[in-house]
Amino acid sequence: MFDKSKEMVVSIDLLNEKLHFEGNVRGNEPISIDYIPPLGDNFGYTSL
């Protein structure tokens, strides 16, 4: 059976037309995720 007390609500939104995303986990500050130019704008952490 699934224990809802351990459920984590996560969202990720694309902020521009390149690779700049913002990740959110309830109760925490948002995290900016981006990539280096020319694919991204280097506004946040680089994804793996």
Image (cartoon, grey):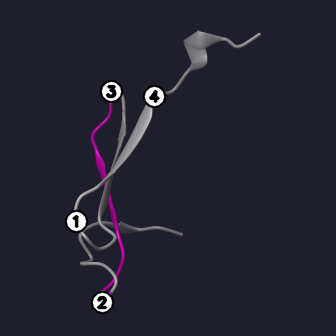
**Mark with earlier residue (1, 2):** 1
Q: Residue at x 30, y 89 (%)?
A: 38
3D distance between C-alphas at marks 4 and 3: 10 Å
Residue type at mark 3 is Gly
Secondary structure category for the residue under label 2: loop
Magenta region, main secondary structure: loop
Q: Position of residue 47 (x, y in %)?
A: 47, 67
Residue on which disc 3 sits = 27
Residue on which disc 2 sits = 38
3D distance between C-alphas at marks 2 and 4: 32 Å
Secondary structure category for the residue under label 1: loop
**Mark with earlier residue (2, 4):** 4
Mark nearest the camera among 1 and 2 is 1
Badge 3 local density, few (<14 within 10 Å), some, or many (20+)?
few
Residue on which disc 4 sits = 9
Magenta stretch contains residue 40: no
Residue on which disc 1 sits = 16
Q: Residue at x 29, y 87 (%)?
A: 37
Q: Position of residue 31 (x, y in %)?
A: 32, 51
Q: Position of residue 4 (x, y in %)?
A: 59, 12
Looking at the rendering, the stretch of residues picked out in magenta corresponds to 28-38
